[in-house]
Amino acid sequence: MKKVFNIIKDVYYSLVGFFSNDIGIDLGTANTLVYVKNHGIVLCEPSVVTIQKGTSKVLAVGEEAKRMLGRTPGSIVPIKPMKDGVIADFEISESMLRYFIRKAHKSRTFIRPCIVVAIPSGITEVEKRAVKDSAEHAGARQVYLVEQPLAAAIGTGLPIQEPTGNMIVDIGGGTTEIAIISLGGIVCAKSLRIGGNEMDDSIVNHLKKVYNLMIGERTAEEIKIRIGSAYPLDEELSMDVKGRDLVAGLPKTLTITSEEVREALSEPIALIIESVRQTLEKTPPELSADLVDRGLILAGGGALLRNLDKLLAEETGLPVTVADDPLTAVCLGTGKMLDEIKYLKKIAEINRYET
């Protein structure tokens, strides 16, 4: 009887899926990307929400909300509902997801979509449940949870189904996911709750400590993007930074160099490299042998930090390649998995938990 019920359910979902544009979501700490089946990536916006103070009334989501960061009056509160790759504020996350789903799925609002959500490999069952419940309350018909390094590997085109070792290092805003993948599954992995946000914080703290200059997180991110690096540059860079002098309390401008920024970023980068080494130490010998030739792939926004690939190659002795489009790798992977429903169900079984 149960077998017949499952067959009927599969047929029903197949028919519903024919009329629905199913969705893949990279629910990141810094940005949320949405992939719509047969349409590609249709949305990439910051994971930020602004609400009315003392209420749950949402005033802005995504790009519009990010523009308000550091500039809001007391009556408006900016919130980042994702912290370290997981949901920190359930209600606000649900509102944000609902907004993104409706924006991406506007042409088929009468059919609830099937949604694939990428999650960090190291999160707890409670955190998985929070992601699943948020997606269901936001309008999902079915929710599949996929580990981010697996999605990133698929998105970058690694041959993960083959009996060979594939290594992916996905550096996001809140987490760094490191995994060795073979035969369609993760052999060993490490999830580090350090990413682009910690790098920004390191820059903020460096300027505060050395120059008594207070800057906002948006300015720190701009510094990282414009002159940040993990390894000495052929030609070092500099830029003017504006902030508030903590001694005088007045606006101040100073010039900083890429060497200073590299020093500020050294601690979070060292932790990432150490985690890569620890993962390699746990890798079975046969897969380690594959990595000597195949090397590792860098994905995520953190992969765009200048010369991070050179530093990793020097520290590990392996070839290091940056993905063609590291920012979209995870989201593309969730989209590709929408076409591999059998594999998706297999992953869902692995991630299943008691409801």
Image: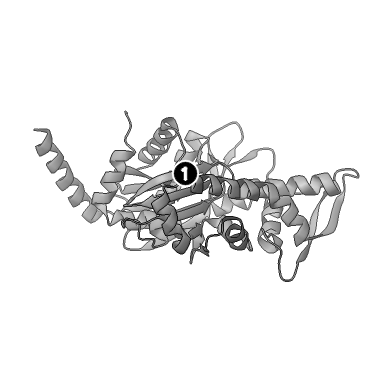
Name the quadrant of the C terminus: top left
Residue at x 61% of width, y 35% of height: 53
Q: Left or right: where does residue 62 sit relative to residue 211?
A: left
What residue is shown at x 52% (from left), y 56% (from top)? 300
Q: Is residue 27 visible?
A: no
Question: Quadrant location of residue 2?
Answer: top left
Expressed as whole percent of the image width and height from the top left, the position of residue 144 reads 33, 44
Q: Pick out the residue farthest to the bottom.
A: 235
In the rendered view, how is the structure colored?
Answer: one colour
Residue 287 location in percent, x, y?
40, 53
Q: Is residue 45 visible?
A: yes
Left or right of 329: which side holds 12?
A: left
Please name the residue shown 17% across and 41% down the image. 9
Q: What is the quadrant of the N terminus in the image?
A: top left
Q: Amino acid at mark 1?
A: Lys
Q: Percent position (x, y) of residue 327?
A: 51, 59
**Residue 316's image quarter?**
bottom right
Image location of residue 266, percent across then percent down: 70, 51
Q: Which residue is more in the foreground, 68 or 223?
A: 223
Check disc 1 and report the residue beneath it: 282
Q: Residue at x 30, y 48 (%)?
A: 114
Q: Nearer the viewer, residue 55 or 148?
A: 148
Vertical relation: 229 (above or below) 141: below
Q: Residue furthest right?
A: 248
Using the image as rendered, state which of residue 321 and residue 40 is in the foreground.
321
Is 226 left, or right, of 119 in this rendering? right
